[in-house]
Amino acid sequence: MSGSFMNLLSLCFKPFGRLTSSDNNNNNNNSESGGEGKDGLLWFRDLGRYSGGGGEFSMAVIQANQVLEDQSQIESGSFGTFVGVYDGHGGPEAARYVCDHLFNHFLEISAETQGVVTKETIERAFGATEEGFASLVSEVWSTMPNLATVGTCCLVGVIYQSTLFVASLGDSRVVLGKKGNFGGGVSAVQLSSEHNANNEDIRWELKDSHPDDPQIVVFKHGVWRVKGIIQVSRSIGDMYMKRQEFNREPINQKFRIAEPITRPLMSATPTILSHPLHPNDSFLIFASDGLWEHLSNERAVEIVHNHPRAGSAKRLIKEALQEAARKREMRYSDLKKIDKKVRRHFHDDITVIVVFLNHDRGQTNLTQDSSLSVRSALEH
């Protein structure tokens, strides 16, 4: 096995994340920072700080697959704050690769403009990460060809000064909890685009970009799929859908497409939205699609708004699991006893990061010169 691939695997085996010394000083398990730990297949960080001025986040991951395919990170420093949720499919390798490279590319590219962040900065970071993974697939093709069939959805939030940038590939989602102008409740505002062939707009997008391919989307096993294989239309990885040299033996027959691939069938270009942060913007919920399969945007925002900040992410996951149990007419306590792999028949891996926005200094204080880096990589 190549050295590059061994590095890919080893970098992510950090059960409780990668924390800087300053983070350890500020986020020990005390009443201020909240707890961190494991509960069966659940890993959680109830409350952590992402900036010197009191910015807070809550983070949790539940494993359902034999090997966790989700990865996530929150990084904070003089550049601002970077949040990433990477929902892998076909295996964990692409999500792990993105977790270890996308943020670094973002830093390198933003340094070219003295730290100024734009949509182009983020798009270039995605492109560099895609090219890097493609190079890895090529390097290990002779020994690990099935790496060409692994991919990941990507959801990234970058808070730079008083602007939130959201970049997405696939169907993870970020939802904003926004306070009303006259007090009272909080409304839910979805800020990300989802690239899933079950959305009619995405099917039209695929048909428009592949007018000579009547089979670009196929209804199979009850859902719409690109080429009858995969539901998401954008990702990092999935090289078998993007480059002809990777769509051939010896990859599994189910991934092979009969006609030559003359242009990519899936895209790695993210949809990027910029949202000027407003004092009424209260919090952001970043989550893989496993959460949204069971909770509506409104329900998720209601849960966060009506409970203490500490444990928000864990609370959302538990509510989703309770709903998954109800759908199968079983008790939540019985669902919790089901082991990984078998658990995947009841729910997906789920990652949730809740970022609380502070506006007490005239602008959100996410860009202070503090240092924090947290990654989740739960393995049992």
Image: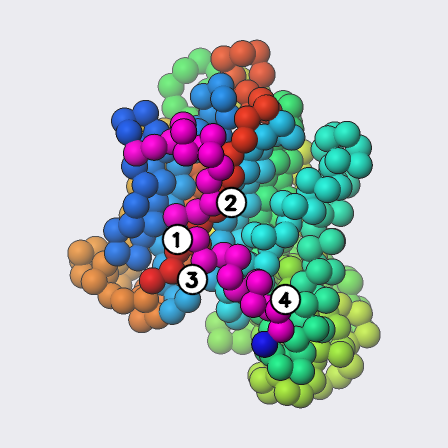
Side (left or right) of 276 relative to 39: right
| Amino acid carrying mark 2 in the image | Gln
The answer to whether mark 2 and mark 4 are in CB contact below 8 A is no
Cα separation between marks 4 and 3: 21 Å
The answer to whether mark 4 and mark 1 are in CB contact below 8 A is no
Instruction: Provide the secondary structure element on which disc 1 rests.
Output: loop
State the quadrant of the C terminus.
bottom left
Between disc 3 and disc 1, whose residue precedes? 1
Instruction: Provide the secondary structure element on which disc 4 rests.
Output: helix
Cα separation between marks 2 and 4: 22 Å
Cα separation between marks 3 and 1: 11 Å
User: Is 3 covered by the magenta stretch?
Assistant: yes
Q: Is residue 133 above or below residue 165?
A: below
Cα separation between marks 4 and 1: 21 Å
Reading the image, the residue beneath label 4 is 4
Q: Nearer the viewer, mark 4 or mark 1?
A: 4
User: Is 312 covered by the magenta stretch?
Assistant: no
Query: Residue visible at 45% across and 58% down?
Result: 13
The numbered disc on residue 44 is none
**Crowd band around label 4 with a 10 angstrom C-alpha radius: few (<14), some (14–19), many (20+):** few
Reading the image, the residue beneath label 3 is 68
Between disc 1 and disc 2, whose residue precedes? 1
| Amino acid carrying mark 3 in the image | Leu
Cα separation between marks 1 and 2: 13 Å
Between disc 2 and disc 3, whose residue precedes? 3
Residue 154 pos. (x, y %): 59, 52
| Amino acid carrying mark 1 in the image | Pro
Between disc 4 and disc 3, whose residue precedes? 4
Residue 255 pos. (x, y %): 61, 80
Name the one closer to the observer, 111 or 237.
Answer: 111
Reading the image, the residue beneath label 1 is 15
Name the one closer to the observer, 297 or 163.
Answer: 163
